Image (spheres, helix red, strand yellow):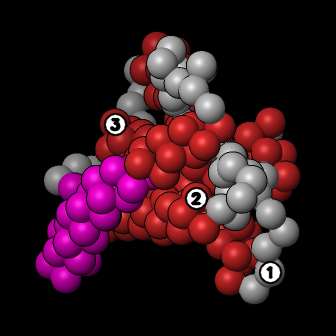
Amino acid sequence: MEALGKVRQSGRTESGAGSLLACVEQWCLYLSMAAVLVMGALIVAAICGRWLFSLQIPDDVLLVRDLMIVAIAMPQAAVATARQNIVVEVFTDRASERTKARLDTIGNLVGLVLFAFLTWGAGTEFWHAWQSGAYYDGDLDLPQWPGRFACFFGFGMLTLRLGLSVIDNSTGLSPRSPEV
C-alpha cells in the first residue's frame, strides 16, 4: 500500500492523458495485488486439498503461472512512476544532482530500449496465442492469451512510462532533474 501512496504523490500534477495513465497504473497495481492474493489462496487450497482430502485442484500450476505473470508484469509502470526501482547507489551517492539526473535519463533510456523489445516480443506472442486459439494442455484447457496479454500490457505500460520519464528528465520536468 505504501507504493500506491507514492504513485499518487509522485511527479507533478497531471491532467488529461497523464491522469488517465496514472489511473491505469493504479488499476494495474490493484490487479497485481489481487493476483498475489488469489495465487496465495490457490496454493494454500491446493496444498490443503492434497494433504487433507487427497484431492487435486485442476491445472493449479498453470493458474499460478499465469497469475505470477500478472503479479510481476502489471505493477512495473507504477513502480517506475513512484521511482521505486531497484538501484545501486554506491557510485552515485557523491555525484551532483545534475549528474544524478543525467544518469537517471540514461538509465530510463536504456530501460526504454530494452522494454520496447520485450513489449514487441510479448505482443507477438499474445497475438499468436489469440489468433491460433492456443491453450494449455491440461484438465481445463485454459487459453494461453490472458497471461500473454497481461505480460504485453504490463510491459507496454512500463515502456510508455519510461518514455515519458526520458522526456521529463530531458526537459527538466522530473522531480529529480536539476533546476535550470
Residue 142 is inside the magenta segment: no
Furthest residue in direction bottom, as rendered: 16
Provide the secondary structure element on which disc 2 rests.
helix
- Res. 112 image quadrant: bottom left
Q: Label 1 is placed on what type of residue?
A: Ser
Give 14 or 104, whichever is nearer the viewer: 104
Is 133 situated above or below 158?
below
Q: Which residues are magenta?
A: 108-136
Give coordinates of residue 119: x percent, y percent.
Answer: 31, 64
Name which residue lies at 60% across and 19% down.
94
Disc number lying in front (1 or 2): 2
3D distance between C-alphas at marks 1 and 3: 42 Å
Contact flag, marks 1 and 2 (Cβ < 8 Å): no
Chain-order first, disc 1 or disc 3: 1
Which residue corresponds to the image point at 74% horizontal and 40% vertical from the top-left?
Answer: 3
Q: Which residue is mark 3?
A: 61
Counting residues from the N terminus, which is met first, the one under dot 1 or under dot 2? Answer: 1
In percent of width and height, residue 41 lies at 60, 33
Q: Amino acid at mark 3?
A: Val
Image: 18 above or below 34 = below
Give the residue at mark 1.
15
Q: Earlier in the sequence, mark 3 or mark 2?
A: 3
Label 3: state its secondary structure: helix
**Is 131 a magenta residue?**
yes
Q: Secondary structure at mark 1?
A: loop
Disc 3 versus disc 2: nearer the observer: 2
